[in-house]
Image (tube, grey):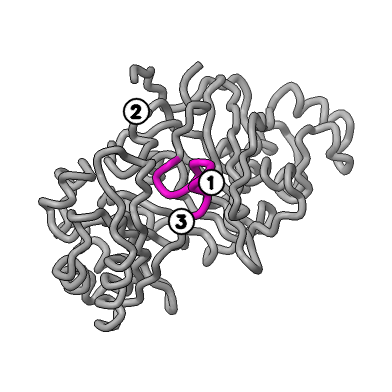
Amino acid sequence: MSVSHKSQPETCVPDLVGMPHSEMEDFFRGLGKERYRAAQVMKWIHQDLSDSFAGMTNLSKRLRDELNERAGLCIPTLIDMQCSEDGTTKFLLGLEDGLRVETVLIPSEDHDTLCVSTQVGCAMGCRICRTGSMGFVRNLTAGEIVSQLLTVRRRLPSSRITNIVFMGMGEPLANFDQTVKALNILSHPNGPQVSWRRITVSTVGLVPRITELGNRVRAKLAVSLNAVTDEQRDQIMPINKKYPIGTLMETLRKYPVTRGDRITIEYVLIRGLNDSDADARQLVRLLNPIRAKVNLIPLNDEATGDLESPLPERVLKFQDILLNRSLMAIVRKSRGRDVLAACGQLASRGTELP
């Protein structure tokens, strides 16, 4: 697919949805206004879900008119919703420049999780993910990332979204600055107030950015490993040629992990490639002494045509080997497969360039 590459959309006015609190204080100071206006506006946007300045009734009409002229609110258009038989809902959102992204709401018994995208397309080219087949189009702004949550909450006010996972379209750490900005907005007391302990950022293994992420924010880290040797990983994840497994493991050993937390290792099981007993034993050795837990994810056949899902009994045997060696391992249930909302499936025709 031939696409144009843009780092950010062209905008004429500042987007207040994508402004962290300190930046918004500076914005209002530049207008000659009081700093506390930042807290007021952030609460209107992220807690009251206001989609216009007109409804911000504790601001003077004069200030609202000025904001209409000097600023904007990044509000994507909800184009489509697809509901899976298991309750998972995929949202197709239209951005201001006509591009489209997907975000996925995953319900649980006592809470909901939102899986957000950070890019239109992806440059990583992983064979186990359909998003990579789109190629890279552009990064999302912080406002476009955060507004995925706001849009879903507006559409489904009864949703109980407490958890955010940066596991949708794109590589979050390849859009580092906007991802960090979005994280700080999501967790702020005047923002959506999502607890740091309930935010997870997933990466294919951009080693320098992993270190920087640990120094900048308190979000949980997930790493898409999917192999135990460089030979295996080279076949499915091109990033491994730049940052091989040994380098990645050394970085994870040094990563700051909050007491009681663990780094999540995502391991997509592929029949005949990385699902043997020997692979399981090697995974245990690789992760020692990293404080980690493993999410085992049977490959979604729809994500790629030339790789196959493992046999169910092989998945359970792989898990047993990890558990018997005191490595926490969970088989992640595939959610939303019937609407192409499961792991590795985000890249529907609706996300293509017009």
Residue under numbered circle 2: 135
Query: Mark 2 or 3 closer to N-term?
Result: 2
Q: Which residues are magenta?
A: 334-345
Q: Earlier in the sequence, mark 2 or mark 1?
A: 2
Residue 135 pos. (x, y %): 34, 28
Identify the disc placed on residue 182: 1
Q: Residues within 10 Å of mark 1 (few under 14, many from 20)?
A: many
Q: Mark 3 sits on what residue?
A: 334
Judged by depth in the image, the label closer to the viewer, 2 or 3, is 3
In magenta segment, residue 338 = yes
Residue in front for this viewpoint, 99 or 227 = 227
In the image, residue 85 lies at what x, y percent? 60, 51
Report the side of 203 relative to 325 (left or right).
right
- Callout 2 crowding tier (Cα within 10 Å): few <14, some 14–19, many ≥20: many
The answer to whether residue 219 is left or right of residue 89 is left
Task: Give me the residue at 56% from left, 20% from top.
Answer: 98
Question: Which residue corresponds to the image point at 34% horizontal and 17% vertical from the top-left?
Answer: 2
The amino acid type of the residue labelled 1 equals: Ala
Residue 314 spot, x, y in % from top left: 27, 66
